[in-house]
Every structure is written in structure tokens, then in C-alpha cells.
Image (cartoon, helix red, strand yellow):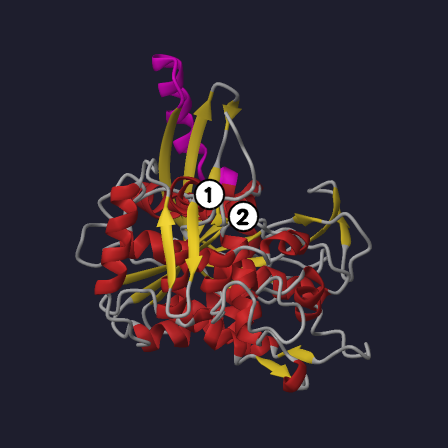
């Protein structure tokens, strides 16, 4: 057996060509580049803002969350092709012709584009434009004729390991952290807002919903909008906002108190009796009108779950403005509101897990809050690319319900040999790749898509 390094130009990320088609079809890198202001002298520029963003987004989707990774990734010819480089070997560069892509230092200057006091500052981004772009691109993925759009609210805790701007100690997370606000529609994040560690859940959510709802209304004109969240979002302002608009509903967790517990005493009695007879956990549901003494301006429909488990009583409550008669698909009883409507918000956790575990969205290692917000947005755009790849090309396959991490390992991590000539880039994939049929199907479906911006 004999081995050497004469194999030519190889890549272990052949699936990045699929991401390239998704990026070009949706126009993510192209549109995102319009949110940046580039004051560099273009005579000396090797990498456009669009190419830098495509390189970073593809790297995140492929599992390279650190900028340091790009010091070696810049040698990858397929990553260069996906970033839009004409010569994937770097022969057309002005300075360093040994590699086509940007190094970590260049990408770092892009992410630190908010640091305007630095004399090297040549790039700046408009945070409001990026925020609006993410919202519009995410909403564009929703079906126009949907009957119901469900928005799930959640606030996470991203632990920090440095002296980042805006950090704050949280006893709940047992460390210094940021607390970003996420708004997710199905499997699609429509809002990711990085907030300092001392923010209350109610802060910023009203402003976010006031921007989100009109964009959804423009896309899905006849759909009713349902907003779900835990008790941290149960505030008068949010409920009043929903009640003041047509076809906007909410189901929110409600923190228990002595008055609420007293209202479900009878249901708790019957649940405890059934627990004694069956030896298993049991639950009963009830509903009633309830109003706080000061914080609420009106009485509202409250659903109570009286549950008795092996550990004891476990009462839970939600407040909603959903009509009991429903929307023509059955009565929205107390049990149905709690079990079918409210508890379904647990699916949001799967999206957030992919953001954090698969795309490292909690890697907030720069000092500035604005730079970390940009990193959060980039991770969200990378997730959007993976979600669109799954939704548009993998239906009916074994990866139809796979997470971003599984799709990456099984579909995108494929060895490929790259041969570059004057007229073309010829890619030869590994003959032993076990997902050849799925990969071919993805390419076929991508070619058949008529990409539209509306």
C-alpha cells in the first residue's frame, strides 16, 4: 500500500452545491449584501460583501461556526464555487492567488462592522434592514392560502464566557448571558432579536409583533393568526394588541395563584379520586372568566388543568381569546385548547435546538452586542437555507423530517474531486456515497423550481 498527497483538489463538503442553489434561488446573500455599506477602495478588494456573506453562511450550514475555521476552508474549491467565485482556485485574485476565499481576519472585520471608531472600519450594516429582510424572507416561505398562522414566542438564555457588552447574571441560567427573543412560525424563525441579560420577557415583544403581523397579513390575507407563549409573555399589552385586531388570537400560559387554584378545586377533587382508583396520573379540565385586580383591564377566558400525578397536584392555567364555538372545525373545549392548541407549542423547541445545537447560534464571542446580534442573524439565515433545502427537495425521502445536523452529516458531507479548466468546473462525487439517489433527487427538484420573490 502506498499513499501520498497527489489526489488533486478535493473537498469533503460536496453538498454545498445544493446550498448554493438554495442561496441563489432565494437570493439570501444577494439581498443581505444590500444591507451593508461598503466604503472600501474597490481597486484593492478581492472579496465582495456578497461573497463574504455567502462564504460565512455556507460555513455555518456546514458546521463551521468559528471564524478560525475559514483559515483552512479558504482552500476549499467547492466552498469558493458556492460563494460565487469565478476561479475557485484563486487565480484571479489581486493579492494572494493561492486561495480563493477570505481569511478569518477579513470575515471578522465584516462581523465587527458596527465598530465605527476603528480606523480600519470600512463596512457597516443597517440592523433594521437585516431585521426586516429576515422577516420578509421567512414570511415568504409561508403558504399564501393558509387558513391559520401560528406564531410561537420564546426567550432563551445564551450563556457568555467573557466580558461581552450587555451581559448580565441570571440566577435561572446560573451564569452571565444574553436573552434573545425568538418568534417561530412552524419550522421557520421569523424573528431573532438579541437582548441584554436583564431584559424582561414582555420587553420588545409588542414592538416585534407590530412589525410581524402586517407582513404576515400582506402574505396570507385571509388567515387567522394565533400567538402562543408561556406565562412570561402573559401581559396586558400583548393581549390587548391581539384583541384590538381582527382575526388575531392568543393562547398564553398563566402563572398560578391562590385564586386560580381555588377555582379548580372541584376539578382537582375528581382528578385525585380517579388517581386513587386507577393508580395512574389523571387530569380534569375546567374553564372560567377571570380578571386580575390591577394588571388586567377586562375579564378573560381562562382554562385550568387540574392534574394529579405520582408527585402530587399539578394545576396549570392558560388564558385565551379563542371562541369556544371554534372556527367550523369543532368546539374548542377547555381540554382541546390546552392539549391540542397550547401544548403544541413544544414543537418550537425543536427549531431552537437546531439553532443552538446544529448551527451554534449561541456562539456570542465578540465583545459588542451589535456584532453578536449580527452573528445571531447569520445563524438564522443559515438555518433558513437548511430548512428550505429540507422543505423543497427532501419531501418523501428518509430525510423529510430530519434535523439540520442530520441533513448535514448524511447529505452534505460527501467527498468530491474538483477539476478546473478554462471553460468549466468539473466535480466528481464519491462513488461509494450511500445517499446518491437522494442527492440526485434534490438536484432534479432544485432545477425544476421556478424561483419567485413573491
In the picture of the structure, the residue carrying the numbered disc 2 is 63
Q: Residues within 10 Å of mark 1 (few under 14, many from 20)?
A: some
Circle 2 SS class: loop
In the picture of the structure, the residue carrying the numbered disc 1 is 405
Nearer the observer, 380 or 255: 380
Nearer the observer, 334 or 407: 407
| Residue drawn 78% across the image and 58% down it | 164
- Number of labelled discs? 2
| Residue drawn 62% across the image and 67% down it | 97
Q: In the figure, 242 relative to 409: above or below?
A: below
Nearer the observer, 282 or 13: 13
| Residue drawn 52% across the image and 29% down it | 2
In the rendered image, residue 138, in percent from the top left (x then y), is placed at: 41, 66
Q: What number is the disc on residue 175?
A: none
* Predominant secondary structure, magenta span: helix
Q: Choose top left, top right, bottom left or bottom right for residue 414.
A: top left
Can residue 298 be spotted in the picture?
no
In the rendered image, residue 44, in percent from the top left (x then y), is placed at: 67, 81
Nearer the observer, 418 or 113: 418
Circle 1 SS class: helix
In the rendered image, residue 46, in percent from the top left (x then y), is placed at: 61, 75
Can residue 212 be spotted in the picture?
yes
Q: In the figure, 204 relative to 2: above or below?
A: below
Contact flag, marks 1 and 2 (Cβ < 8 Å): yes
Q: In the figure, 208 relative to 418: above or below?
A: below
Q: Is residue 399 left or right of residue 366?
A: left
Mark 1 against mark 2, which lies toward the viewer? Answer: 2
Does the segment drawn in magenta span residue 365?
Answer: no
Magenta range: 261-281
In the rendered image, residue 180, in percent from the top left (x then y), is placed at: 61, 57
Amino acid at each position: 500500500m502506498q499513499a501520498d498527497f497527489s489526489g488533486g483538489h478535493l473537498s469533503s463538503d460536496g453538498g454545498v452545491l445544493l446550498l448554493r442553489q438554495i442561496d441563489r434561488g432565494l437570493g439570501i446573500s444577494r439581498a443581505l449584501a444590500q444591507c451593508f455599506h461598503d466604503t472600501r477602495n474597490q481597486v484593492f478588494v478581492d472579496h465582495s460583501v456578497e461573497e463574504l456573506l455567502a462564504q460565512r453562511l455556507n460555513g455555518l450550514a456546514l458546521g463551521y461556526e468559528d471564524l478560525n475555521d475559514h483559515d483552512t476552508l479558504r482552500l476549499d474549491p467547492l466552498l469558493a464555487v458556492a460563494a460565487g467565485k469565478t476561479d475557485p482556485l484563486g487565480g484571479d485574485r489581486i493579492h494572494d492567488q493561492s486561495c480563493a476565499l477570505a481569511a478569518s481576519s477579513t470575515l471578522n472585520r465584516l462581523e465587527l462592522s458596527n465598530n465605527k471608531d476603528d480606523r480600519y472600519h470600512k463596512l457597516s450594516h443597517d440592523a433594521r434592514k437585516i431585521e426586516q429582510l429576515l422577516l420578509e424572507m421567512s414570511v415568504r416561505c409561508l403558504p399564501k392560502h393558509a387558513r391559520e398562522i401560528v406564531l410561537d414566542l420564546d426567550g432563551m438564555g445564551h450563556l457568555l464566557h467573557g466580558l461581552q457588552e450587555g451581559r448580565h447574571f441570571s440566577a435561572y441560567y446560573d451564569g452571565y448571558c444574553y436573552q434573545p427573543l425568538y418568534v417561530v412560525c412552524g419550522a421557520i424563525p421569523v424573528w431573532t432579536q438579541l437582548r441584554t441579560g436583564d431584559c424582561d420577557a414582555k420587553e420588545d415583544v409588542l414592538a416585534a409583533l407590530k412589525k410581524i403581523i402586517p407582513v404576515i397579513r400582506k402574505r396570507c390575507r385571509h388567515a387567522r393568526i394565533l400567538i402562543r407563549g408561556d406565562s412570561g409573555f402573559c401581559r396586558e399589552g400583548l393581549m390587548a394588541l391581539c384583541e384590538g385586531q381582527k382575526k388575531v388570537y392568543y393562547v398564553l400560559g398563566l402563572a398560578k395563584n391562590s385564586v386560580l387554584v381555588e377555582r379548580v378545586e372541584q376539578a382537582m377533587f375528581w382528578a385525585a379520586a380517579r388517581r386513587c382508583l386507577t393508580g395512574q396520573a389523571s387530569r380534569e379540565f375546567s374553564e372560567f372568566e377571570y380578571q386580575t385586580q390591577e394588571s388586567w383591564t377586562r375579564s378573560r377566558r381562562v382554562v385550568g388543568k387540574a392534574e394529579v400525578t405520582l408527585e402530587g397536584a399539578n394545576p396549570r392555567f392558560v388564558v385565551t381569546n379563542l371562541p369556544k364555538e371554534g372556527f367550523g372545525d369543532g368546539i374548542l373545549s377547555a381540554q382541546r385548547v390546552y392539549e391540542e392548541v397550547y401544548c403544541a407549542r413544544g414543537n418550537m423547541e425543536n427549531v431552537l435546538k437546531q439553532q443552538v445545537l446544529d448551527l451554534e447560534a449561541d456562539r456570542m464571542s465578540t465583545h459588542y452586542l451589535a456584532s453578536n446580534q449580527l452573528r445571531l442573524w447569520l445563524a438564522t439565515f443559515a438555518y433558513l437555507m437548511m430548512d428550505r433545502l429540507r422543505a423543497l427537495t427532501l419531501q418523501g425521502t428518509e430525510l423529510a423530517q430530519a434535523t439540520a445536523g442530520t441533513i448535514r452529516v448524511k447529505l452534505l458531507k460527501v467527498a468530491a474531486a474538483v477539476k478546473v479548466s478554462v471553460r468549466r468546473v468539473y466535480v466528481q462525487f464519491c462513488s461509494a456515497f450511500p445517499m446518491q439517489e437522494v442527492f440526485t433527487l434534490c438536484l432534479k427538484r432544485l432545477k425544476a423550481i421556478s424561483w419567485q420573490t413573491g
